[in-house]
Image (spheres, rainbow, N blue to C red):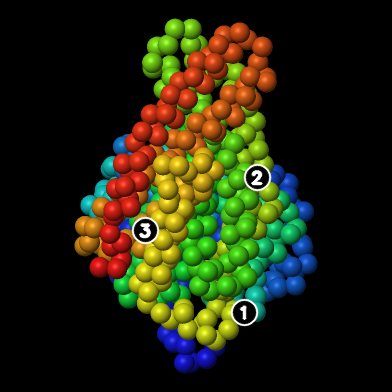
Amino acid sequence: MSGSTGLDAMPSDADHSDDSAPKSPQAETPREIELKLLAPPGVLKQIHDAPIIVQHARNKGSVRLLEAVYFDTPDHKLSAHGVSLRVRRSGKRCIQTIKLPPDISQLSRPEWETPVSGMAPELGLLPLAEIGGPLENLSVDEIAPVFTTRVRRWTRIIALPSATVELAFDEGAIEAGDKQAPLSEIELELKGGDIGALYDFGLALLELAPLQFGTESKAERGFALARDAAPAAARAAPSDLKPEDSVDAAIAKLLMGCHAHMLRNTAAAAHGKTQEGVHQMRVALRRMRTALSMFHREIPAPCLKQLSADAKAIARALGDARNWDVFCTSTVQTIADLNLPGFNAEALRSAAEPIRQQSYTDVRAMLAAQHTNRFSLSLGRIVARRTWRNDIDSETLTILTEPVAALAERTLSRLHRKALKQGSGFSELEPEARHGLRLTLKKLRYATEFFLPLFEDDNSARGYLRRLSKLQDALGVDNDVTTTEHLLSAVAARSQDPGVHRGIGLMAGWLARDRVEAMKSLGSRWKAFKGAEPFWKA
């Protein structure tokens, strides 16, 4: 890379840290960098001596039996903050370990380890005040065992061209009282070198077996098992762009943020107990596609275009589950609350529930599919290696060194102009044109949220976002009604129950009313948005 571009001075992967977790100064914080891959039972034996492993192995490997006990306070103080405290026994040796919340998109989390005399924690040996958070001033009397893991671990050192990796195959179980859950997973821990090598090796293993990108730690799974808790969904973290960031740094930050948002909701989406898992995963992918679109327009790197296509396919596969979630919970309940004579909400839900359950079966199959996990591993590798710098000409390469504010102004101006053009003659727009405008406004909203930290003290920026959001929401009612009409048709085709068909008719009539009411507010909301000043030009 030419020194004149200034890219050599840009932050490396290690410069992007998780500022939300309690920790000591960056230079002194020990960090674990690890990629986890989940394997179906029996699969680990099939790839134990795969050529890709044997070819790069530095040793023959070793087997250890590991028993670990995880601790928490009665009010779940540690796990509620994403902190784990365990004591693990291997042979006659016992090690206590504290791990803080991970930066999941970078495979990294702070951890501290110290030898102890037995299977009870000795907190005085750990720098609790330095670590901070819920651990500060914690005493042994406040904690108790919650669950245990028993694992047969086979490890081997892998020497790759750009990194040294510890490969571990873990098979065993999590035990919480009389409850058990199987463990079958691969851990790739970076011992030195390029983090991109973890993704390289993970992608190579993915070609050998039906593996899944692991997003939950043993601690998270164990605490959930002990408390009969479903995986929690997570909203997007605020954008962490700074005025001093370059376009190159902005691409890395935004893609990592969107990837982390997606990964944090994968387990909740698969579990299906809360509808927020699928919803937030779709939001993450839509935000990611907005980011990829605006970056690819400036930096036409092939890798960005391919990521966008893959993200679109995954988001589409989540669509049915999201639509049926909304229908079975929000939409039907809203009509039920009106107490319309003859409306049987339970009959409608019962008729729709088998379709909703099938949609979640499809979601789980998609999340386990090779193409989905290849997408996550490829995205991680692209960000780790800044692959968008490749295959572009020198003129385009200079854009990467520009301040992110320049990209923000170009992107927001373009989307704002496009929205105004699409909304010309707003009161006469056909439904298809309104739908196109809504999609543009959604992209503009996500882009505004991405760049908002650059205008943190600007009240006009937040005012603009409020007007934009209100207009987008009002246009969304029309789209929601159209979607619900399709769902009602699907229920009608499956049910012969007269009560269900009566309810469908009542819902269809009320939804038509909702559409009319929403249209009444559209004109004023469009005028409010149209009158909003482009804050980025101030």
Q: Are marks 2 and 3 in contact (CB under 8 Å)?
A: no
Camera-side residue of 361 and 242: 242
- In x, y percent, where is residue 417? 41, 61
> Residue at label 1?
391
Work out whether 66 lies above or below 7: above
Q: Residue at x 51, y 46 (%)?
A: 433
Q: Is residue 104 left or right of residue 159?
A: left
Q: Earlier in the sequence, mark 1 or mark 2?
A: 2
Q: Distance of mark 1 from mark 3, alpha carbons?
A: 29 Å
- In x, y percent, where is residue 16? 41, 69
Crowding at mark 1 (Cα within 10 Å: few <14, some 14-19, many 20+):
few
Judged from the image, the secondary structure of the residue bearing numbered disc 3 is helix
> Residue at label 3?
448
Quarter of the image for the C terminus: give it. Answer: bottom left
Q: Which mark is residue 366?
A: 2
Amino acid type assigned to the residue bearing label 2 in the image: Met
Q: Residue at x 39, y 59 (%)?
A: 416
Work out whether 338 lies above or below 200: above
Q: Earlier in the sequence, mark 1 or mark 3?
A: 1
Camera-side residue of 346 and 98: 346
- In x, y percent, where is residue 11? 42, 77
